[in-house]
Amino acid sequence: MIVDSKQPAISRSASGRHEPGVRGAMLADINQIDWVPLGEGVKFKLLRYCDVTGDWVLYVQLQPHVKFGRHKHITPAEFFIMKGELLFERGSAKAGVYGYEEIGEIHEEACGAVETEFLYFGHGPVAFINAQDELLFIADLAFYKDAWNGKLAEDIIS
């Protein structure tokens, strides 16, 4: 594997070989990667990221009725539900459902109906905002890399 020499390899796996920032082809076995907390009732595995584009791929586990904080998509995002059911303004996404979130989309009530696991493909920052649309914080690649390294700056759960 080739790793950017400017970035230390980040490894949080049982095998010690998962490097989510590797450039080029790679495989990530979710069964060999440790969970990292992202807030009360939500944890994630950083599968891949790209410092050039700012994209990241997460495997997320959300406990029942845990709700993400109010947020606005500054860039598009995609998800694929692997297990459970994600509830949000548009309705329900159960296991096997793919979703695309467009630029500007605001989520008030995104939560899991039951324990829910999904792949999340982030294509840039997400703004966490209050009821008056004032910025609370930005969840971007740097945010997730810091959280992966045990430095969670903000809680994404409301």
Image (cartoon, rainbow, N blue to C red):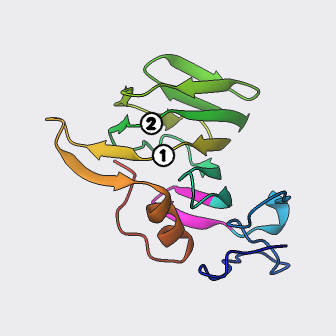
- Image quarter of residue 84: top right
- Image quarter of residue 18: bottom right
Q: Which mark is residue 124?
A: 1
**In this rendering, would 40 be left or right of 44?**
left
Q: Which mark is residue 40?
A: none
Q: Residues within 10 Å of mark 1 (few under 14, many from 20)?
A: some
The residue beneath circle 2 is: 75
Depth check: give the residue in front, 113 or 54: 54
Q: Is residue 70 magenta?
A: no
Residue 40 at what x, y percent from top left? 45, 59
The amino acid sitting under disc 1 is Gly
* Mark 1: secondary structure: loop
The quadrant of the picture occupied by the N terminus is bottom right
Q: Quick check: 106 above or below 47?
A: above
First in sequence: mark 2 vs mark 1: 2
Q: Which residues are magenta?
A: 35-44
Tell me whether the residue at label 2 lies in contact with that at label 1, contact meaning CB atoms closer than 8 angstroms: yes
Q: Quick check: 57 above or below 93?
A: below
Residue 126 at what x, y percent from top left? 40, 44
Q: Main secondary structure of the magenta part?
A: strand
Q: Quick check: 54 above or below 151?
A: above
Q: Residue at x 59, y 68 (%)?
A: 36
* Residue 116 visible in this rendered orientation of the protein: no
Q: Residues within 10 Å of mark 2 (few under 14, many from 20)?
A: some
Residue 101 at what x, y percent from top left? 51, 27
Depth check: give the residue in front, 26 or 46: 26
**In this rendering, would 23 be left or right of 155?**
right
